Amino acid sequence: MTGLSSRPLHRIADAVIYLVLAVLALVCLAPFMNTLAMSFSASSAIDAREVVFIPKGFHLYAYQYSLGKPEFLRSIGISIERILLGVPLSMLLSVLAAYPLSRERGVFRGRTVYAWIFVFTILFSGGLIPSYMLVYKTGLIDTIGALIIPGAVPVFNIVLLLNFFRGIPKEIGEAAFIDGAGHWKSLFAIYIPLSAAVLATTALFSFVGHWNSWFDGIIYMNSDRNYPLQSYLQTLVLKTDLASVAFNSTVQGYELLSNKNIKAAQVIVGAVPVLIIYPFLQRYFSKGIVLGSVKD
């Protein structure tokens, strides 16, 4: 009787949990939907605060204007270059650091010392001015290297990878060594193929980190011509650049444009790559986090 009477209570509890999660999801989704609606709406409707989640006076002129701006397209190109160079480099360095740190003390006696050095960098940083001086003294200012090299070794990704490598049965590695494989062969032939979930997760972290980063572009780039997309979008939040549109009747649909729908369109364009890539890696995300979490 107790089991039967508890079933309705469990169903009610599940319904409440799903309802709360649905409300939280809608709250998180609301700003994006509002920005999306504004990007397709007429400036008069936006100024009148008539746009919430449904576009008013639907048009594509904000996207046409944004994608026709050379500086906007240039910033997208810089971000793409940053992704193509930064993500593979971060993944390579993370794997090369995580593999030796995952070995037993008998194999790598200095493992604990090096692990604590990496953890120390999570807890403490060198500070903004020393970081800038380091980048400046190495000649990376105003180059793509300033956006890639300072964050090329993400310690959080290393922690996920090394704990995942520790979870791989050591008998597999021992069998490979008996067959004549060294550490390099074991890493690339055994450990990496078995680590698809955590590698996909860390690749997603690295991609999102590079794509969404804007502060380093503001600091390390002296010219806005070298800004990545997010740094460029940040400058748009702080300044108004619609004067060239408002008084230029050659811009198609200029009477329907405003700073708000132009900026909204550019924000949506900046979010599209993450929205495209995430669904393909989402199935690995939770599994990679769980398998790469700290083990006893």
Image (spheres, rainbow, N blue to C red):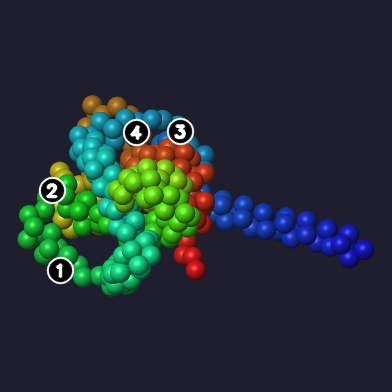
Q: Secondary structure at mark 4?
A: helix
Residue 247 appears left or right of 4: left
Residue 124 placed where, x, y %? 28, 73
Q: Secondary structure at mark 3?
A: loop
Q: Earlier in the sequence, mark 2 or mark 3?
A: 3
Residue 121 placed where, x, y %? 28, 69
Say which quarter of the image contains residue 160.
bottom left
Residue 27 makes an appearance in the image: yes
Quarter of the N terminus within the rendering: bottom right
Q: Is residue 22 above or below residue 156?
A: above
The type of residue carrying mark 1 is Pro
Task: Name the residue carrying label 4.
Answer: 63
Task: Name the residue carrying label 3.
Answer: 57
Residue 120 placed where, x, y %? 30, 72
Check contact, mark 2 vs mark 4: CB within 8 A: no
Q: Earlier in the sequence, mark 2 or mark 4?
A: 4
In whole angstroms, how far apart are the C-alphas of marks 2 and 1? 18 Å
> Residue at the location (29% across, 35% down)?
66
Q: Earlier in the sequence, mark 1 or mark 4?
A: 4
The type of residue carrying mark 3 is Gly
Task: Name the residue carrying label 2.
Answer: 143
In whole angstroms, how far apart are the C-alphas of marks 2 and 3? 42 Å
In whole angstroms, how far apart are the C-alphas of marks 2 and 4? 29 Å
Q: Nearer the viewer, mark 2 or mark 3?
A: 2
Task: Name the residue carrying label 1.
Answer: 130
The type of residue carrying mark 4 is Tyr
In whole angstroms, how far apart are the C-alphas of marks 1 and 3? 50 Å
| Nearer-the-camera pick, 59 or 212 | 212
Neighbour class for label 3 at 10 Å: few (<14), some, many (≥20)? Answer: some
